[in-house]
Amino acid sequence: MVFPVGAVVAVVVIALRAASAASKNKDGTPTPAAAPVPVSRGSSSFAQDTGAAGTLLYQLLLLGGVSAGLGLGVALGNPLAFGPGALALYLLFPAWTGRVVFVPLGLARLAYLSGWLSRVAWRRDKPGGPALLAAWALVHQARPSAASIAWVEGKLTSSKRAVQGSGVVAFGLLEAAKGNLEGARAWLQSVALFDPRVAPTQVRRVAAEWLATDAAATGDWPRVKALTRDRAWPPSATLTLLGALADRLNGEPLPTNAGLTLWWLFAPRRLWSRRFVNEVSARAPQKRAREQGLPSPPQGLDGPARATFLTLALQARPRPTASAVVAVARTWEAALGDDLRAQLHARAQLNGGGEPEDAMHEVRTLLEQALGPLLPAKLEGVSGELPPLVEAAVVARKDALFADLEERMNRMDARKLDQRELPAFEEWREVMTLRRVYLESCALGSEGDRSLAFSILRDKLVNYGAWLYNQRLERPIANAVFRLLEAEAVALGDDESARLNKKNAGCDL
Amino acid sequence: MVPGLFERIAQNPFYVLGLAPTASRTELEREGSKLLSMLQLGFKDALTYRSPLGEHPRTEEAVRAAMAELRDPKRRLVHELLAALPASQTVPAAPQAAPELKWPRAPRVFGYGPKREG
């Protein structure tokens, strides 16, 4: 049977032209969205995309080619005669072939070529998409060569196109290929900040699954659960199975073994995952050991002895909680009171000298230096005023973070004013670092501190985003900046900033 | 580097000399001399001392430094505060949490890289 290629193509081309005409404004000017197609895949919709008709035509021709080629192979009965049909089939589905064949085999250059040949999945996402496939292939190699990594990196950094989610994922996977897992986590996590139009499902899924499998490899099941619950990431069978395993290993009664088996049946790579799923099924669900409180000091100890006991117990904890550190500081505050001062006066008289105030001041300094570093980055579970012994450490840490935040923001602002451009990926790295410092500043303080931190960024970062958008044409990164600012402004009730950033974030990608 | 709180507790002169913070100047001199003699003769009992942070090696130098520190009434007051907990009072170790079940093969199983080191 002959496929009616000509007729189908004609119908499709006419339909697309009609759609393109309909997308024009009443005054006849095209929508701004259609203009900068090369900037990013989010710049235009399918109907506005002038290359869409060509793509369809190309795919239909290939479909005809596959049909004819395979028919020829069957007719001649010669395996070699299937060659043209197989080639047409590869050209019809190059991205899929790259993902399921070349990526698992670790063939980075062929994976890149396949992505590059893609007219559907990655057509408006180059070189990010092909680089993602190539980087993913490199991750499969036990020891990827530095030259291969540099080759893929070169493809990404030499491009004049705007950075999109695919490029960021590719960069993250390259960090993983280099063995820098911490860096890879930061890059891949940051993809969630991009608008889904420039970080489509296929891109975010790779990032989410990499992050979840990485957390599972380290036994960080709470993080696995958090990732699989986060709506920023698209669902997948792999994530569902990992989420179910995390539930069980986090001590949840559900899913049952039958439920776990069901999710396993839906997941890919069942043969390879069966052993671990069986291992988890065989374990009785048990609540994760919560952070246990500090041991009670023995009876009969006086105030300083009790406080010393608790301090040493705290120091022996691998990850003391903020509430435990604060509780020990409060015990010391109670111990270093007037009673102790009176006792020290009496001891000083017996010893023939000594200044009780100096002694207490020296011990306070030692305690501040010892307890400060034990405080975790986030002050969770702490209620009431901080005792002075740890307040000094918190204030010092907060001051350092605010100073760092301000310095970074000023540096970015000065760079913008001087038109000193960084490579696009380095611009994104700057934004990621700024966001990390901002979040750390907020984690230590109150709502007022969060407002203070936001005031450092509020205007300068929006100007930086506008510069990225207008001058650098790095619209996806600028959009992520605006969205970040908008979310924060809404959370802090800054209506003016929320309105401005919402408007900016609504601009064309 | 200036020793921090935990070093100061572990190396507290009262613990080094095996004395209570209420010990008199005479007791301090007597105990210090006795320990120095024992160390010179290589007595096994004198080679270590206890603090709430565990056992530590005792040296002649440490004994002399401890005696010097406690002769100074100003320094002695700080050491008394830091030796409030008896040396024999050990602090229970943190309870060992059950080891997390890791899945080092997860990245490999789902196509995200080679097996991680367990």
Image: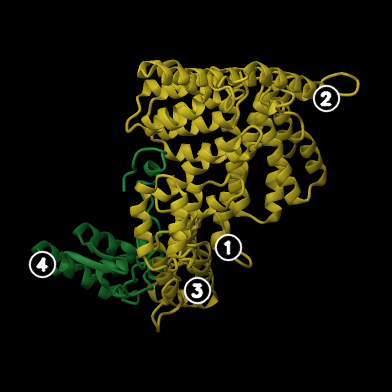
Chain colours: A yellow, B green
Res A388 label: 1
Callout 2: few (<14), some (14-19), or many (20+) C-alpha neighbours within 10 Å? Answer: some
Q: In terms of secondary structure, where does tag 3 sit?
A: helix
Residue at 41% across, 77% down: A297
State how far apart marks 3 and 1 are (Cα).
13 Å
Location of mark 2 (residue): A22
- Earlier residue among tags 3 and 1: 3
Residue at 47% across, 41% down: A210
Q: Quadrant of the N terminus of chain A?
A: top right
Residues tagged 3 and 1 counted as in contact (Cβ below 8 A): no
Residues tagged 1 and 2 counted as in contact (Cβ below 8 A): no
The residue type indicated by label 3 comes to: Ala
Q: In terms of secondary structure, where does tag 2 sit?
A: helix
Residues tagged 4 and 3 counted as in contact (Cβ below 8 A): no
Res A335 label: 3
Location of mark 4 (residue): B43
Viewer-side residue, B5 vs B115: B115
Task: Point out residue B112 in the picture as x, y percentages from the top left corner.
Answer: 42, 39
The chain under label 1 reads: A
